[in-house]
Amino acid sequence: MVDWQFFALLLSNGVLIGLMYSLIALGFVLVYKATDAINFAQGEFVMIAGFLVAVALGAYGAPLWLAVALALAVMIAFGFGLERVMLRPLIGRPIVAVIMATIGLAAILRGFGPLMWGAETKPLPLPIPDEPIVWGPFFIPPIQLLGAGVSLLFLAIFGWFFLRSRQGIAMRAVADSQQVAMAMGVNVERYFALAWAMTGIVSALGGLIWGNLLGVDVHLALVGFKVFPVVILGGLDSIPGAIIGGLIVGIVENVAAGYIDPWVGGGTKDFAPYVLMILALMIRPYGIFGKQIIERV
Amino acid sequence: MSGVGGAPRPLLSVNNIEVIYDHVILVLKGVSLQVPEGGIVALLGGNGAGKSTTLKAVSGLLRTERGEVTKGNIEFLGEAIHRKDPAEVVRRGIVQVMEGRHVFEHLTVEENLLTGAYTRRNGRALSQDLDLVYRYFPRLRERRQVKAGYVSGGEQQMLAIGRALMARPKLMLLDEPSMGLAPMLVNEIFDIVSRMNREEGVAVLLAEQNAAMALRFAQYGYVMENGRVVLDGDARTIGQNEDIKEFYLGLTGLGQRKSYRDVKHYRRRKRWLS
């Protein structure tokens, strides 16, 4: 006999958590879409943003709006600065150079956060109730609802930006061919910087929400690893793909944990998405919505 | 360099430029040419003669390939532009259509056209200009929502030219528009380009290996070889030149088509230089 209430619980939890993964995956997708760079430091961006909010709230007693504004401003500036200092010299180099650089950056940030603000786990309180909302068989923590809402909002904003706005079209043109974009008078470097700054925004929001959920310390960066199954499933450069990939990962890991954990004693959540990722790579290497390489014969 | 006495100032004037790639490889060795306002000028020559490099020197795209204008200068409307970045050159009214139909494959046809207008501020004129491009290239209107990577080669070339027109340039640099296209299509495209030239007043600097075709549309021509201009003159005069006929048009002195096999060995190797 299937316990439908249990299943509904796992499902709803998976959907909401999945959308929160989508938010972080969006940061990754923005950079990949515009600059073809694979950002292995996405989780660390989120961690640094979490630190900023938590420290501003806790150590300095700043109001929440100020702490969030500060995190946004710092992360945007960080995105711009990073592009200028670290990534611009790597333009035109093999893709592996960018990968290694972001892996190095990730390690530096993982050290820098605790070094600056201490290694202990900091709370990131938000003025929302802790008691879950009970609605039929569903059992929903408000923070997850907020996280999923913020996530959908920003996915919609960036989706609109890429599809409809002049800048968004120019950014896709840059992603398609840098030299041709240049020939049309597009200032390519400015769009690279913009993409990193947009990732900064997304990371700041991710840090706020995931920081509240998990607490802020160096382990917050681990949410970045969940980005990979999300973007492999959805497609590295697709915003709708980030949503779908996030939902799949969120649902699979929750359902798997709910049904398999009792048998194996836990840990399913951590590996189920990666099993799925490897299967996806074998079947559809460019993801569900990813850009297929257009070949002419 | 022959100064045209009393003639109006040329739109584009390339003065004795030298281009070096990677700090060592000398590609252009003193190239000079001029494009008058509203004119069509052909730049002829074989593979590796330096035609594309000359166009890229003008548009500023050279620097994306680690090339550099080391001597001479390029003036557009009397102002030096050879140190400007490509975006600035486009804003001043020069746009290059690169060799090999470079469209943004993952953008739709219409989005491609919109990127052409990137440097322009006036948003309201855009829809009029889209209409203008669709009038010149009706096929593009039919395919406006299709991803550019999936349209035919001829349509991609039309798209590349239409996209350049969206920048409302004073000068369009066309690099080998005939490459890889069927003769009928080449004709169609050249007809449209010369209509654009007449009706919109866009001057054209056209680099082509297909000399016969280029000389039919151009008023003036330059022949390049090995990084130098070796011959220039009215399109008609150049078309009559015996050497051009033999080497680029495949005709003998009698105006008959001739097999390359019959060309005497020492003639095959003939070059103006060296």
Image: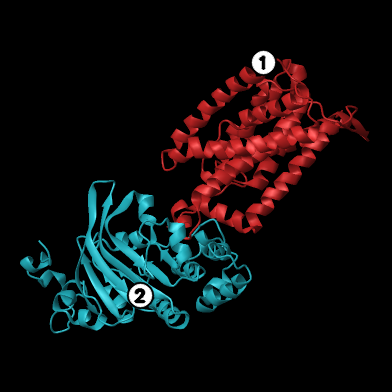
User: Looking at the colours in the rendered structure, which chain would you say is drawn in red?
Assistant: A
Q: Is residue A149 above or below residue B179?
A: above
Residue A103 image point, x, y percent: 52, 28
Q: Which element is circle 1 on?
A: loop
Q: Nearer the viewer, residue B77 or B177?
A: B77
Residue B150, how many percent across, how many down? 51, 61
Distance Cα–Cα, label 2 vs label 1: 71 Å
Q: Is residue A87 left or right of residue A20?
A: left
Q: On the picture, is B110 further left or further right than A253?
A: left
Q: Which mark is residue B193?
A: none
Q: Where B272 sits versus A162, above or below?
A: below
Look at the numbered disc 2 and give the secondary structure of its residue: helix
| Residue B274 figure quarter | bottom left
Tell which of A35 and B101 is nearer to you. Answer: A35
Q: Looking at the picture, how far across and down is residue A165, in whole percent? A: 64, 57
Q: Is disc 1 on the same chain as disc 2?
A: no
- Residue A106 vertical position relative to residue A203 in the rendered view, above or below: above
